[in-house]
């Protein structure tokens, strides 16, 4: 796995998504308390940016049609989406947010 610094924890706003582009991927970061979650930024239903959606506890709602996704797993929770989105492992260490990308070797 490749570990990539993507943000400072203090730069992420509680309950609001932030898009980052990492290794040719659009990733949505979400801060909930001291935890940070990362999902593929595109809704599996209609190409909307999940980083622009509303966050409720551990769920993000797509801003276009309201499909909801679990921030921890990427699983779809409500229609109209029927497919999950990719979820990525995040580590927060010393105030830095790091993303672990699968299938890539560490530097």
Image (cartoon, helix red, strand yellow):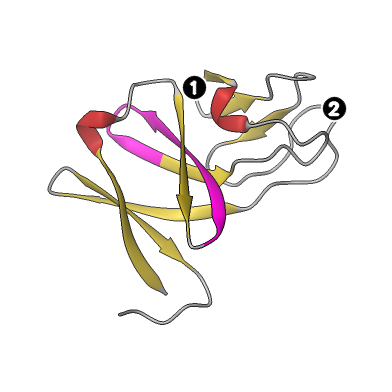
Q: Are circles 1 and 2 on residues that touch, CB within 8 Å?
A: no
Report the magenta stretch's main SS. Answer: strand
Q: Residue at x 34, y 79 (%)?
A: 106
Q: Residue at x 83, y 36 (%)?
A: 45
Mark 2 burial class by Cα count in 10 Å: few <14, some 14-19, many 20+: few
Depth check: give the residue in front, 7 or 69.
7
Quarter of the C terminus within the rendering: bottom left
Quadrant of the rendered structure where residue 70 is?
top right
Q: Which residue is mark 1?
A: 57
Question: Residue 73: horizontal and vertical position, in percent?
Answer: 59, 47
Q: Which mark is residue 90?
A: none
Q: What label does residue 79 carry, if any?
A: 2
Q: On screen, 62 above or below 6?
A: above
Tell me the quarter of the picture where residue 13 sits.
top left
Q: Please report the residue visible at 69 percent of the width from the left and 43 percent of the height from the top.
A: 75
Horizontal side, residue 69 vs residue 30: left or right: right
Q: Position of residue 50 (x, y in %)?
A: 61, 31
Above or below, comparing residue 107 to residue 30 in the picture:
below
Q: Is residue 82 left or right of residue 53?
A: right
Q: Is residue 31 magenta?
A: yes
| SS of the residue under disc 2 | loop
| Magenta highlight on residue 25 | yes
The stretch in magenta equals: 24-36
């Amino acid at each position: 796995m490749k570990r990539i610094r993507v943000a400072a924890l203090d730069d992420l706003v509680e309950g609001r998504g932030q898009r980052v582009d990492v290794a040719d991927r659009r990733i949505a970061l979400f801060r909930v308390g001291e935890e940070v979650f990362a999902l593929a930024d595109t809704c599996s239903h209609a190409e909307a940016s999940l980083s622009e959606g509303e966050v409720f506890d551990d769920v993000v709602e797509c801003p276009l049609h309201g499909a909801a996704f679990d921030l921890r797993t990427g699983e779809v929770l409500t229609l109209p989406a029927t497919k999950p989105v990719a979820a990525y492992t995040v580590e927060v260490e010393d105030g830095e947010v790091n993303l672990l990308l699968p299938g890539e070797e560490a530097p």
